[in-house]
Image (cartoon, rainbow, N blue to C red):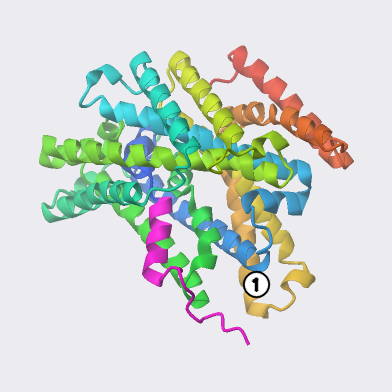
Amino acid sequence: MDNHNEPKDNSLSFVKFVALIAGSTIGGGIFTTAGDMAASGAHTGSVLIGWLVAGLGMLCLMMCFFGLNKYKPELTNGIYSYAKEGFGEYMGFNSAWGYWLSAILAQTSYFTLLFGTASYFIPAFGEGNNLTSIIASLVIIWVLYALILRGVKSAAAVNVVTTISKLVPIFVFMIVLIFIKAFDPAIFMHNFWGDGTMSVFDQIKATNGTTVWCFIGVEGAVVLSGRAKKASDVGKASMTGFLGVLAIYVIIAVLSMGVMPTEEMAELANPQMGGILAHAVGPWGIILINAGLMISLCGSLLGWTIIASDCPFSAAEQGVFMKAFTKKNEVGAPVISVLITQIITSLTLVIVYFSANTYSFFYNISAEMIMIPYLFSAAYFLKLCFDEKVMGGQSAGEKAKNIIFAVIGTVYSVWMLYSSGLSLLLLSTILYTPGLIIFYLGKKERGEKTFKTTAEMITAIVLAGLAVLSAVLLVTGKVTI
């Protein structure tokens, strides 16, 4: 009889699994969240509620992924497979397309943050969106392209350095502010709910893009649950890692709101954590945070490039994208997938230059795009909860728990799409629509009908119509981004 708790070789211990979850979830966003929320108009009370909502919603989404990984282990392509299995090929394609664009936009936001941060040391980089920054970003993009084509899929040494450079400034920030007693309750309570010009409900909505951005990647850690040394560790490690990350986010937020008033934080340049620490301890604070963040981002960009390039490759392998995306070179690198990904990333950076948009704009779009794949995944898990063939062996308590996770995860995903605002929702329809061309070409290549059901055809027509309407509204200025 197979003992699922028997240790396996080359697997992850409880501690390493917790560290993996924390490392894959904590990114550059933690260095800017407090200031970004302040700039969006959110005050202390609404920020705390926003983190509570995000914590509950993302926890339930994570448990949806955990459940899908447990009950549908054969769906090895994860977030793409879930939408396809649950709602048909066109929805599966859109999930893959949205996840790919989200990863590309995440890269774009990281480039603007990297050079916006570098401008503290080299002012010529401005806010990370001027010509100097764009040229430097393009150079890095194509250096990364060359590295990946040579087979650079993982670099343990780079990961160690970037993880340390990311975590050390964060813990220094927390420890120093607590040790020197920089937290002032009067500042924390000042204007707790705002001055009334923006409702608390709107303030809470304004925090949502930032909170989702901070948790992007949580699904990747759950998919790796099969590598846990003991099956019994998976749930405990997932929960411990997630709650640990959430605790760090909340502590950073609370400490920040007790050091500077919201109005002052809103005026800080990226990364705002540096400005907050400098306000408490002097110039060395911003130097530490900025240097640590830059090293972290340089390493993260390699990881994000690999993730973004793998999206169309994996989708093509399961028949969602065209076969060309599956082409590999002699070292196994997906050459076409990497090339197209880097071309699109380069184009988004050109858009950055001409639109003068900054880091927060692109991470909000990235978060918006990824919510569609998240919604499909949560909705599919909810659908599975009532499939007796798959879930029939559960106890009543386990079934109830899974349904609760699935319902909250689905509702939270819908809430995120709603709360992102009309402009981002309209923009997402424009970004999703060009995927129809890739979907059509892939189907034609396989000699299949473009749409297998009337529902898929209607969905595509509605999406294209919304994209045209959105473009008109944006061009005429009736809706602004």
Which quarter of the figure has residue 40?
top left
203 relative to 222 in the view: left or right = left
Q: Quadrant of the N terminus?
A: bottom right
Q: Is residue 197 visible?
A: no
291 relative to 300 in the view: left or right = left
Magenta stretch: includes residue 32: no
Percent across and percent down for residue 373 are 63, 46
Question: In the rendered view, would you say 351 is above or below 188?
Answer: above
Q: Which residue is mark 1?
A: 400
Residue ID at (69%, 25%): 467
Q: Nearer the viewer, residue 367 or 389?
A: 389
Q: Write the start and end of the magenta stretch as one range.
A: 1-25
Question: In the rendered view, would you say 403 is above or below 477?
Answer: below
Magenta stretch: includes residue 12: yes
Residue ID at (63%, 54%): 78
Element under label 1?
helix
The amino acid type, in three-letter code, at marker 1 is: Ala
Q: Is residue 216 visible?
A: yes
117 relative to 142 in the view: left or right = left
Which quarter of the figure has residue 10?
bottom left
Percent across and percent down for residue 370 are 57, 42
Percent across and percent down for residue 49 are 43, 51
